[in-house]
Amino acid sequence: MTTQAPIRVAVTGAAGNIGYALLWRIASGDCFGSNQPVILQLLEIPPGMQRLEGVIMELRDSAFPLVHDIVGTDNAEVAFNEADAIFLVGSRPRTKDMDRSDLVAANGPIFVGQGKAIDAVASRKVKVITVGNPCNTNALIASANAPSIPPQQFTAMTRLDQNRAVGQMAERAGVPASEVQDVFIWGNHANTMYPDPSMATVGGQSATEVFDEEWLQGEFLNTVSTRGKAIIMARGASSAASAASAAVDHMRDWWQGSAGRIVSVALPSEGWYGVPEGIVFSFPCRCEGGEVTVVEGLTVDTFAQAKIDENVAALLGEREAVSDLL
Amino acid sequence: MTTQAPIRVAVTGAAGNIGYALLWRIASGDCFGSNQPVILQLLEIPPGMQRLEGVIMELRDSAFPLVHDIVGTDNAEVAFNEADAIFLVGSRPRTKDMDRSDLVAANGPIFVGQGKAIDAVASRKVKVITVGNPCNTNALIASANAPSIPPQQFTAMTRLDQNRAVGQMAERAGVPASEVQDVFIWGNHANTMYPDPSMATVGGQSATEVFDEEWLQGEFLNTVSTRGKAIIMARGASSAASAASAAVDHMRDWWQGSAGRIVSVALPSEGWYGVPEGIVFSFPCRCEGGEVTVVEGLTVDTFAQAKIDENVAALLGEREAVSDLL
């Protein structure tokens, strides 16, 4: 029997495909540990409430020993009440006629409201991961609207890009994913993101020795940056279980530590590596004691620097598009 | 780092909704333990192969440390090759114009072929759980076509019914599911199944004292037996994540032990409780050292006996309908 007090875990877009994949991973203990009870606080928009009811029925039907209670609501202040961890998964999906700036504009108001609700009712120590796209800028908007919560508690997910990079390196080298370590992502969770191989190892050997530069800067980079589209083509649906799995990895490492490994976390820049303050940017990080720390002092080569600059420009552009919401 | 040799885990219907929910639970270590590497061997029918390719891409994109390899195939002998554990998830779904005997007849040939393939290539110690419906009789067909594998290694899943019963008792009593123990299922995974409260405890108290007989034999029984339909009504889709979760629970307990708890496993009757040999029937069981043992000597009251008789009759009828496949 468990004796720890339950923590409150909020998930938005809980009845969507990523939410559906995520909830069972959280409920089973994969994220917060096999001895940590949870109270699930699930948010949906009103048209999603009936489907959420079905999801909650299925969660109850799973009889998880760690799940102490389940709340379903369309009110953000109910969902975020005293929340210790929040997964901001729900967002308006991109439709055919939208470009990226339309997507940024369409999602902005959602994250204004959620930021204000977090500010009003969440635990002062809440850890927030933003999964709904454009996740870096959505995290920025939420943080800006939650002035009483330190900005570093608002993060965005580039772990899916990292995991995709690990998967590509493992497949290329013919080794299990466990043999690939310390590849990380710079920048925006978008096609411009850069999977940096400079610190990565494959079976203990430097990735830049195992793979040639042509592959790393060509096919590897291209495959990782366009992977979302390739999944849609093959599966007939966008990444769901892999996105949920990356969210679990991100939050688990933040909560329980990354055991010395470098992991990718997008968080509000404090000027590291010349990235201007005021944008949410993915950096190489380590997690320990519930804190995320940017790994400073790494060498950035010309190729990487150009990619970082490209991501900075893109994120400054996104910020400009939502400046009235900040 | 893990040092155990990987085991081979086969899943059929791997690109379906239950398969999609199941694979990430297995890959994360929820089923076989957090130190047990796995090789995933995934079977689909030819029209599902492209979708399966997308599922495998997402599995690689999840960079699970425990996943040593992933095989996708439409050939059962490839999927079951040296398999240590097999989840028979894929089956023909019931369509509007089919009654249960049509469903039994439509699925029979699938499980003949899969039984023969298991007989030919799987590990002699393989543990098989049948999830695809009608799962009891499908397990019987597979076993009958795998004469070199002991019948007790072919089981069918009633754990979803058990978990639903636990969830209903927990909700009624206002306690977490962890407080409900030892409720179990008799019979067929069908509307006739019987969730037996006689050994169950709720917060340490006997369930038959906590709840009145009217609720146990009325609303409780009715809710559990019609839960599948209620999920479809609410969610607009049949149970997937909860079914996958029950499959994980069933196989995990079989593999790692049930820690003294009574759990529901449908397996070929050896005549326990007067249930005739030659049908796959859910009994109260305990799991230890990789073995499932039926808990014998429990008192069966008149109400339960009538339910057991009803399930025996139904399963004898199903067997009759597929007698040419056995």
Image (cartoon, coloured by chain):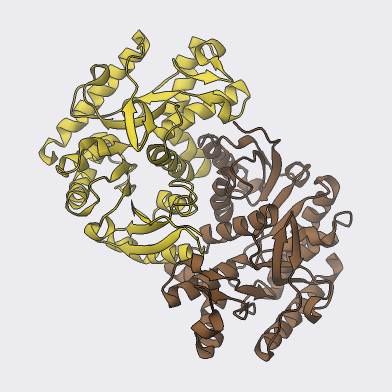
Chain colours: A brown, B yellow
Q: Residue B160: give x, y in percent of width and height.
A: 43, 35
Q: Against B239, is B277 above or below?
A: above
- Taking the image as shown, residue A248 lies to the left or right of residue A102, namely left
Report the residue at 36% width, 66% height from top. Answer: B50
Q: Against A192, is A22 above or below?
A: above
Q: Against A125, is B209 above or below?
A: above
Q: Residue B301: give x, y in percent of width and height.
A: 36, 9
Which residue occupies the foreground of this view, A137 or B181? Answer: B181
Residue positioned most to the right: A148
- Taking the image as shown, residue B301 lies to the left or right of residue A236, namely left
Q: Residue A206: give x, y in percent of width and height.
A: 55, 80
Q: Is residue B141 visible?
A: yes
Q: Quadrant of residue A221?
A: bottom right
Report the residue at 16% width, 39% height from top. Answer: B144
- Taking the image as shown, residue A90 lies to the left or right of residue B289, namely right
Quarter of the C terminus of chain B within the rendering: top left
Residue positioned most to the top: B302
User: Count of labels shown?
Assistant: 0
Report the residue at 34% width, 42% height from top. Answer: B131
Which residue occupies the foreground of this view, A101 or B178? Answer: B178
Q: Residue A248: give x, y in percent of width and height.
A: 60, 55
Which residue occupies the foreground of this view, B296 or B209? Answer: B296
Q: Quadrant of residue A190?
A: bottom right
Q: Is residue B12 visible?
A: no
